[in-house]
Image (spheres, helix red, strand yellow):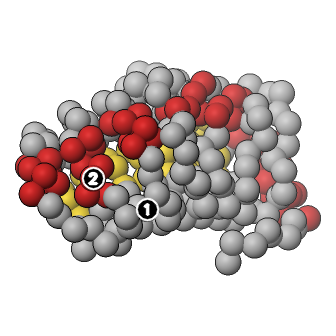
């Protein structure tokens, strides 16, 4: 419901167990690069732990983390830096108001889920993603806001993106943003539903100009 969640002692204990298991490589495995070392999955979803712990152990073998539905309004500075080889990060269903700055230090990140948070718009809101040259999937749906033109410009510079979810984000100016988003050269899937989108001729032309667009949701 958007209100701060109560910290549960049992959840903190389970989170500690899962962190230890991931550290000791006793967590579920995920598919990694052929011939590469094993990669692991850390599931901290739905665990009301309050502030995440400070970590000092090596978690470079963890490539997938989910914190879905854990009630986080922010992530402590440095937490994500313990996972330098992350490829998938699921932060959906939290209370985040901004994209964590530490994402800029995750060069292998390929998929980022931020739907159903409380992201607030600012011209610099996507700056942490600028250097992520492997980011292929970004899901922002159900974060109602008015996207500034400068933020959309940054979004359009994330050229590796193939999947972009913007449903339920900007009900005012989404059509105006489409010519800028059309600069994404590799975009294949685009979700724009629940934005009260009025397709102007310019917006239609922008959609038709996307060379690899295979799926478009305007429902």
Residue 213 is marked as: none
Residues at badges 1 and 2 in contact (C-beta under 8 Å)? no
Q: Return the x and y of residue 172 as percentages of the image width and height.
A: 37, 64
Please tell me whether residue 37 is drawn above or below residue 110 in the rendered image: above
Which is more toward the observer, 93 or 173? 173
User: What residue is disc 1 on?
Assistant: 169
Q: Element at badge 1?
A: loop
Q: Nearer the viewer, residue 189 or 17?
A: 189
Q: Percent from the top left, x then y, of residue 50? A: 84, 57
- Whichever of labels 1 and 2 marks the residue nearer the N terminus, that label is 1
Query: In this rendering, would 25 be left or right of 204?
Result: right
Q: Residue 22, percent across and down?
A: 70, 40
In this orientation, which residue lies closer to the viewer: 62 or 86? 86
| Residue at the outermost right position | 9
**Which residue is tagged 2?**
176
* Image quadrant where residue 9 sits: bottom right
Q: Nearer the viewer, mark 1 or mark 2?
A: 2
For the point 76% across and 31% down, which residue is it?
78
Q: Quadrant of residue 219?
A: bottom left
Q: Which image quadrant: the N terminus?
A: bottom right
Q: Residues within 10 Å of mark 2 (few under 14, many from 20)?
A: some
Q: Residue at x 41, y 34 (%)?
A: 154
Of residues 12 and 111, the one nearer the viewer is: 111
Q: Can see residue 86?
A: no
Q: Which residue shows up at 27% across the image and 41% down it?
A: 180
- Identify the secondary structure beneath mark 2: helix
Does 151 sit left or right of 53 as displayed? Answer: left
């Amino acid at each position: 419901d958007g209100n701060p969640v109560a910290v549960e002692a049992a959840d903190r204990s389970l989170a500690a167990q899962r962190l230890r298991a991931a550290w000791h490589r006793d967590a579920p495995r995920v598919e990694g690069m052929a011939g590469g070392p094993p990669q692991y999955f850390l599931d901290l979803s739905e665990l009301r732990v309050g502030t995440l712990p400070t970590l000092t152990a090596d978690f470079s073998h963890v490539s997938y983390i989910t914190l879905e539905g854990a009630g986080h309004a922010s992530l402590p500075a440095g937490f994500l830096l313990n996972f330098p080889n992350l490829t998938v990060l699921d932060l959906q269903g939290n209370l985040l108001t901004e994209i964590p700055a530490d994402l800029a230090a995750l060069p292998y990140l390929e998929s980022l889920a931020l739907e159903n948070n409380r992201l607030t718009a600012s011209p610099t809101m996507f700056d942490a993603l600028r250097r992520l040259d492997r980011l292929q999937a970004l899901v922002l749906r159900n974060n109602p806001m008015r996207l500034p033109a400068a933020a959309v410009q940054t979004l359009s510079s994330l050229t590796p993106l193939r999947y972009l979810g913007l449903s339920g984000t900007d009900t005012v100016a989404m059509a105006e943003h489409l010519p800028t988003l059309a600069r994404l050269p590799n975009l294949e899937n685009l979700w724009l539903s629940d934005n009260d989108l009025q397709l102007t001729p310019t917006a239609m032309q922008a959609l038709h100009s996307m060379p690899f667009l295979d799926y478009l949701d305007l429902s």
